[in-house]
Amino acid sequence: ADSKGILFPQESETRERKSLDGIWQFRLAPRNDPEMGFRDEWFKKPLQETGETILMPVPSSYNDVTQSKDIRDHVGWAWYDREFWVPKEWMSQRKIYLRFGGVNYHAIVWVNGVKVAEHAGGHLPFVAELVDTANLSSKRVNRLTVAINNTLNQNTIPQGSIFRPTANRYPSGYFTLNYNFDFFNYAGIHRPVYLYTTPTSYIDDITVSTNLQEDGTALVIYNIETIRASAAQFHNDVNFGWIPTVNQDGLSIVVRLEDKTGNIVATGTHGIGYLSVPNATLWWPFSMVEKDEEAGYLYTMVVSLQNLAKVDVDVYRLKIGIRHLGWDNTTFTINGKPFYFRGFGRHEDFDIRGRGIDNVMIVKDHNLIKWTGANSYRTSHYPYSEEIMDLTDELGIVIIDEISAVSIDGFGQELLETHKQQMRELIQRDKNRASVVMWSVANEPQSQKTQAGPYFKEIFELVKSLDSHRPRTIVINKGYQEDKAAEYADIICINRYYAWYSDTGHTEVITASMIEDVNNWIKKFRRPLIIAEYGADTVAGLHSNPQFVFTEEFQLEYLREHFRAFDSLRANTTLIGEMIWNFADFMTGQGITRIVGNRKGIFTRERQPKASAHLLRSRYHYLANEL
Ligand code: GCB
C-alpha cells in the first residue's frame, strides 16, 4: 500500500524528529535566464562552485528580508540550500522523511543531487521519503536544495498571469506577474521543515470523527491506516534490534483514549472501530463556556501498532476534541446549541517575515482574538499553518477552513483538477481538527459565469464525499440573482462593502442596503448565511470630524451602521454570523487603492488597536452576554 497520510511529524517512543529550520543559503535565478540553476545543475555541484549566495531565514518569505527590490518583487525560481546530518542510528532500519509545512507556490527538492519531491500549491504540506536513492549518509554531511517558483498561471490555485508588454518604452525582458487578489504574493519556505523517522512498519494515517448519543455518551469513530514492512525488511529490523522477534503477521492495532490528566477513558482494537466515552468532556468554543480552561478540551488518542508480545512497534498520539456539528436550512449548531459567528477574516502576514510562520506572532494574534471577544475566524484566503490550527483546537476558536481558491475565473478542466487536488490535501491535513467546523471552497469566484455552476457542483460533491461531518460553504461577492455557485453550499457566506466600494463615504446607505441584500439571499436560498467580509481602509492615527474615508472616525461609523443591520437581521432571519475584514492591516501589491498595504484591519500590521478595535470588542462582548 502507498502512503497517503500527512500526519504531523511528532516524537514518540518509536519516532524521532529534527528541525531543519534556521538560516539557509539563498539566491534568485537571474530574471533574464530563469532556467540557469537547472541547466547548470546547482543541486549537484558543491555550493561554492555555483556562484554567490546570501543568507535567508527558514521559515520566512524571502521578499522583505533584504534591501533589494529585485528580491522583493522577484517572479520565477529562487534557490535554497543547506546541509544536514543524519544520526547513524537512523540509517540502518528506520524510514526517514523530509517534510515541508508549506512552500509558495511550486517546489522541487533534491537531496544530495537526487530529486526527491515536487509539489504545487502554496499552503499545504508535502513529504519526501528519503530512500536509498537519495544517497543519504551518516558518515558525511548531506546536501538539501530546494528550488521554488512563485509564478501563477490560469491553472494554478490561486490564478495569476504573466504580463509581457511589447511596447518599445519597456526595458527589454520586462514582465510582471498580475493577479486578481490584493494580498502580496509572498514567496518562500513559509513553514517549518522537518526531518523525521518512523519504523518500517508504521501508522500512516488516522481519521477520526465524533458523535453524541441521546444519553450523553460520545462516540469516537476511527479508521487507522498502517503500512507494513516487507517480510525481508521486517526480518532485517528484528535482527537489528528495532523490533522484538515476532512474526510479521503478529502486528495489531491498539487504541486508547486518554483524558487531559492521562486517565484512560476508552480502549479499542483493530484499524476500524469506535470508542464509546460515557460522560465525555466536550470540545466547546471558548465563547460557550464559563471559564477559559473549559474551552477546547482535547483528549489524546494514543494509537499503537503492537507485536504479539504487546510491544509497541509504532506509536502516534493524536489530539482530538469530542463535539457534534449540526446544520439545516436555518441553523448551525455545535453540541446542539446554535452558534453565532463573531469573528474575522485574516491573513498570515507580518512585518519582515511576510507569510512566514512566527511563534511570537501567532500567540499574540490569538491573544488579541480572545481579547476582542471574537469566537471564530476564516482562514482567508488559503489554509493556515498547522501550528496555528493547533492553537485554535486548543483555545476553542472556531475555524472556517478555506482553500486557496481566491478570485478564480475561467473554470476549465485543468483548473478544476488543481482545485480538487488542493481540497483533497486540505481535508487530508485538517480532517481531525475539532476547531474546523466548515470547509470554504472559494472566495469571490466569478460565480456569475455559467460555467461556475457545474464547476462548483463538482467541487461541493467532492468535499461531501471526503467529509460528510462538516458543512460546506463558499464566499460570494456577486448578487443573489447572478450567482451560480452558492446553491450547492450548505451555508452561504457573502462579502459586502456598502459605502466603501460603492456609494463611497455614504455610511447612511449601509444599514438598509445590507438588510435588503441579506433578505434577498435568504429568501431565495433558504440557508444559514454569514457576512464573511465588510470593512473600510483606515490609516491608524488619521482623524476627521465629521468622518471621512480612511480616518478612524469613518471606520467607527461604518461599523456602527453595520451593527444596526446585523442586529435587525439576527432577530428576523437566518443570519448566523458577522466577520469583519480584517483582523489586521496586511501587505498588498502596489496600487493606487492601497496605502502600503490593505488598511482594513482593526489592528495595525504591528498589532496595535485602532479605535475600531475597542468598538468591535464591546460589540463582541455584548453579543457574548446576549447569546
Ligand atoms: C474582498 C476580498 C479580500 C480583499 C477585500 C478588500 O472582497 O475577499 O481579499 O482584501 O475585499 O479589502 O478589498
Image: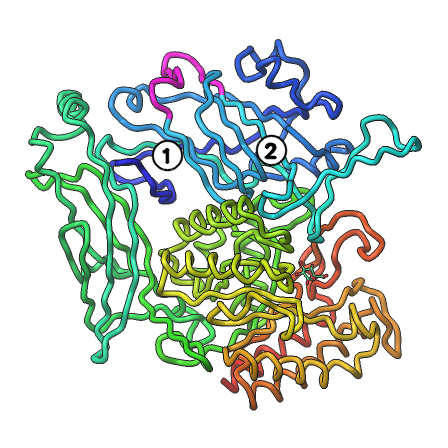
- Answer few, some or many: residues within 10 Å of disc 2's Cα (few below 14, many 20 plus, some between 14 and 19): many
On screen, 318 above or below 40?
Answer: below
Residue 624 screen position, x and y as percent: 52, 80
Kind of residue at badge 1 = Arg
Q: Is residue 408 left or right of residue 2?
A: right
Q: Report which quarter residue 309 is drawn in.
A: top left
On screen, 506 above or below 362?
Answer: below
Residue at 19%, 62% (x, y): give it. 275
Residue 606 screen position, x and y as percent: 69, 55
Seen from this angle, which residue lies furthest right?
A: 169
Q: Quadrant of ligand 1?
A: bottom right
Whole-angstrom CA distance, mark 2 to mark 1, is 20 Å
Main structural element of the magenta stretch: helix, strand or loop?
loop
Viewer-proximal residue among 456 and 294: 456
Residue at 67%, 84% (x, y): give it. 516
Residue 340 screen position, x and y as percent: 50, 78
On screen, 158 above or below 3?
Answer: below
Q: Is residue 304 left or right of residue 561?
A: left
Part of the protein shown in magenta: 130-143
Q: Are marks 2 and 1 in contact (CB under 8 Å)?
A: no
Q: Is residue 17 left or right of residue 161?
A: left
The residue where tag 2 is placed is 57
Residue at 61%, 66% (x, y): give it. 476
Kind of residue at badge 2 = Pro
The residue where tag 1 is placed is 17
Please check the rendered image and state whether residue 131 is part of the magenta-colored stretch, yes or no: yes
Seen from this angle, which residue lies furthest front?
A: 450
Quick one: quadrant of the N terminus?
top left
Please check the rendered image and state whether residue 311 is part of the magenta-colored stretch, yes or no: no
Label 1: state its secondary structure: strand
Viewer-proximal residue among 478 and 604: 478
